[in-house]
Amino acid sequence: MSDHDHQPDGREAGGDEPDDAPVPLPLDGWHRAHGARMVPFAGHAMPLQYEGIIAEHLWTRESAGLFDVSHMGQLLLSGEGVAEALEALLPGDMAGLGEGRMRYSLLLAEDGGILDDLMVTRRGNGFHVVVNGATKYDDIAHLHEHLPEGVMLNHMDEQALIAVQGPKAVNALARLAPGVEGLSFMTAGAFRIDGVDIWVSRSGYTGEDGFESALPAAAATRIASLLAGQPEVKPAGLGARDSLRLEAGLPLYGHDLDPETTPLMAGLGFAIPKRRREQGGFPGHARLMLEREDGPAVRRVGVGVDGRQPVREGAVILDVEGAEVGRITSGGFSPTLQRPIAMGYVAAPLAAAGTPLTLGQRGKLFTGAVEPLPFVPHHYVRKGA
Amino acid sequence: MTLYFTRDHEWISVEGDRATVGITDYAQAQLGDIVFVEVPPAGATLDKGKEAAVVESVKAASDVYAPVSGEVIEGNGALESDPALVNTSPEEEGWFFRLALADPSELDGLMDADAYKAFVATL
């Protein structure tokens, strides 16, 4: 047998580390002790799966999965004028972000291309920023280059990040950290588990309710064991994380987003509030305004694929005449829906739900259609709900 | 009946000039959850070392190469609706195809169960 593709997540591996040897993360030994199959990912060794991707995926949808996302970059930005400095690099409303409020945002290049997608949370006088693992060193370099003097950037590489995701995540986490149940989607606060200070946000990358906890690396093994010891929780690996986020229609940087894509091409216009759109002052504002006027040339869409065979990243999208009109950027088999699903970019006129598409992969043609995202509904716990 | 194994993690069960082919337990464990299998149709001619079947797990697609040449007698139709049979019963119900051997001497040099086990231990 021979593999056609690398493991979907393995593709992010390497390249961003000065050294090719994987840098062990705080929970490395914990994963191995729990039977994980480890793979290189973003310059680290990460768990691909424990008992199996489908079982972990389905368990997360019905109960709660524990995901180690310590490979992600955690940055703390602070200092005089930090909100304004961030607004010069991101299209989000940083100045108006209240304590403990979290926003999805984008690091943009001058031409409006996406350098990374990230989460920003107001934390005291500063901002807690979580960036992708594969891009963290590039992001830090970009920030160092563009942030004014007086704004401090602290790469908190002594911190672990553990996500607990699923409808019963709240039951498990609230037992250990009473009060987290009071958070609503995209808010965060300081809590304690077993004497350890943790910073918890109600957020995630699966489409389910859930939490992400930042904590000192030294306590990571103990906290992971406490969390995984709750009856609702089982560890889940990168494989399930990828299939869950695909079902949830969430883009993955380096696959569905890159410097060639803009926020409007990617359907991420929600990350640019009215004030920023009107006032500008961030990279790519001119291109954004043009694309708002004329519409982007291509759009990110969901694609439902007929049959059972997955169509994956790199497959071409053809129109009825057989002309190439786009590319698949993520694809796989949906454990929840029990059928193949994908995401990709198509010429804007073909982006309407229901538009029939032909897909080409390794000399074989598939039929499918544009499908609304998400494939599986989100279950976020919003304020007042 | 004689059982042979290849370095590509296929097994071949031979009875006279008929052979049944599948992937090993080691292979299915490496692939993880299998969600799609495409087997060759009856009548197809397979050449040793050429693509014979496709197996896709949640995370990746892989080719299965014909370990020996021959004409396909039957593909395992059960895998179309239940590809996970390859995970649960790789060396029995999860067989891929049966074929009429074109050249039984192609079996020479393949591993037996003990040699394959020793080979897997080195991986």
Image (cartoon, rainbow, N blue to C red):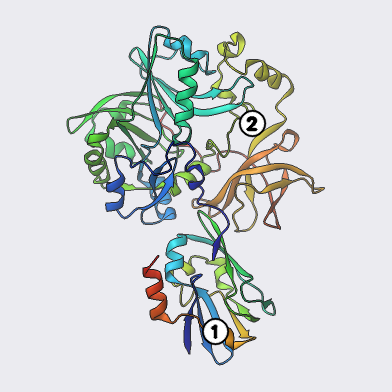
- Name which quarter of the figure residue A77 lies in: top left
Element under label 1?
helix
Q: Which residue is mark 1?
A: B107
Percent of width and height locating residue A58: 42, 51
Which of the chains bears the disc numbered 2? Answer: A
- Name which quarter of the figure residue A4 lies in: bottom right
Q: Residues within 10 Å of mark 1 (few under 14, many from 20)?
A: some
CA gap between label 2 and label 1 equals 52 Å
Residue in the image at 65% along x and 30% along y: A265
- Residue lying furthest bottom: B16
**Left or right for A371, reference A228:** right
Residue in the image at 60% along x and 69% along y: B53
Which of the chains bears the disc numbered 1? Answer: B
Comparing A349 with A312, the one in front is A312
Residue in the image at 56% along x and 13% along y: A276
Which residue type does callout 1 highlight? Leu
* Above or below: residue B48 compared with residue A385: below
Number of residue marks: 2
Residue A260's disc is 2
Comparing A188 with A197, the one in front is A197
Element under label 2?
loop
Which residue type does callout 2 highlight? Glu
Percent of width and height locating residue A235: 33, 48
Percent of width and height locating residue A224: 26, 41
